[in-house]
Amino acid sequence: MPPIENRSFSFGSLQHESHIPPQFIWPDHEKPSPDPPPQLDGGSEAARLVDRACRGHGFFLVVNHGIDMKLIEEVHKGVDLFFKLPLDAKEKALRKKGDHCGYASSFTNRFSSNLPWKETLSFRYSAERHLSNVVESYFLDVMGEDFDAFGSVCQRYCEAMNSLSLKVMEILGMSLGVGENYFRDFFEGNDSIMRLNYYPPCQKPDLVLGTGPHCDPTSLTILHQDSVGGLEVFVDEKWHSIAPNPHAFLVNIGDTFMALTNGIYKGCLHRAVVNSTSPRKSLAFFLCPKTDKIVRPPKELVSEENPRMYPDFTWPALLEFTQKHYRSDMKTLEAFVSWLRQNA
Ligand SMILES: O=C(O)CCC(=O)C(=O)O
């Protein structure tokens, strides 16, 4: 057969030709199938697995997430530097009463029992375009020029967490059968929180807890823990430790998302333990809705068999409840709902 370029063909004319030149005809075993083959749906297996995890306990791992390891390492390095500063330097960022952002430790805490063995630095992230520097500006304003670079690392990390959490929302929308855009759109422009956790060693680790048992009141948590280990989740009536894996993010459903799914997906009870030798760090990104969004499940998730479980609310109302009236634990959402009903 002569090579095709020796003939006077081009796709311009060939596209209308029913006689196909033999040079284009593939052997039978390599020809495309006459009926279109089933579609490869990359998301469906993930959606099925996520569905099972979220109906059972609300916790799963994400790997192959595409987030640059260098960025994650840079945040961990900055966390080390920040928490090793003398107390008076960290207290420049001291959390104010009733606020959820800033530096906090059990020594600056509003509670007097069951104190967590940890220090934290929390700050706001917003996915709104006009607030695209909110993390960087926070560091610059409260910690000064020396923390400018760390602020910009944290800004980039939060942006990566925002993208990842919106992708997870697509999978959750598929697994709940409301379409991939439903929750993604709901969390567009989210007003989220980032928390850096630092757990110093403790000589009696079996007496204390780094973080007490709680479900997150927020919507979705994306956590990265360092190589020390200490996170535990409560599944099948017992605690399980989650081995550290620097390449994985741990994702858990929070109370607000549980309400958005009309209780179909469960918030996950978890805690962190400490040890006697090594400080431990974790990075928690808490996805939260934009402040004016009404938390109400889509109609597809409400039925006679599964009637509305929670009244409408906004995220700032639940946040205020946890800041002023109630310390987050495993019953935060229940307590919030009865408080809402009493104060209606
Ligand atoms: O440090 C951890 O592994 C858990 C942190 C946590 O639960 C939190 O910050 O709410």
Image (spheres, grey):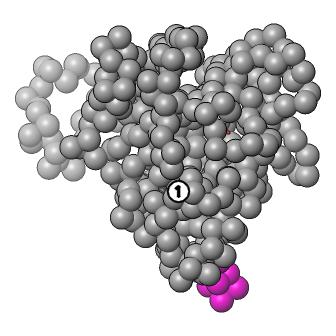
Q: Is residue 23 visible?
A: yes
User: For this view, does 168 lie left or right of residue 236?
Assistant: left
Q: At 87% across and 23% down in the image, what residue appears?
A: 205
Q: Which residue is mark 1?
A: 319
State whether the magenta stretch is mostly helix, strand or loop: loop
Q: Amino acid at mark 1?
A: Leu
Residue 280 location in percent, x, y?
A: 70, 19
Q: Is residue 51 visible?
A: no
Q: Quadrant of ligand 1?
A: top right
Residue 233 location in percent, x, y?
A: 79, 42
Q: At 64% across and 23% down in the image, what residue appears?
A: 198
Quadrant in the rendering for residue 337: bottom right
Residue 257 location in percent, x, y?
A: 57, 59
Residue 109 location in percent, x, y?
A: 64, 38
User: For this view, does 212 lie left or right of residue 263?
Assistant: right
The stretch of residues the image draws in magenta is 302-309
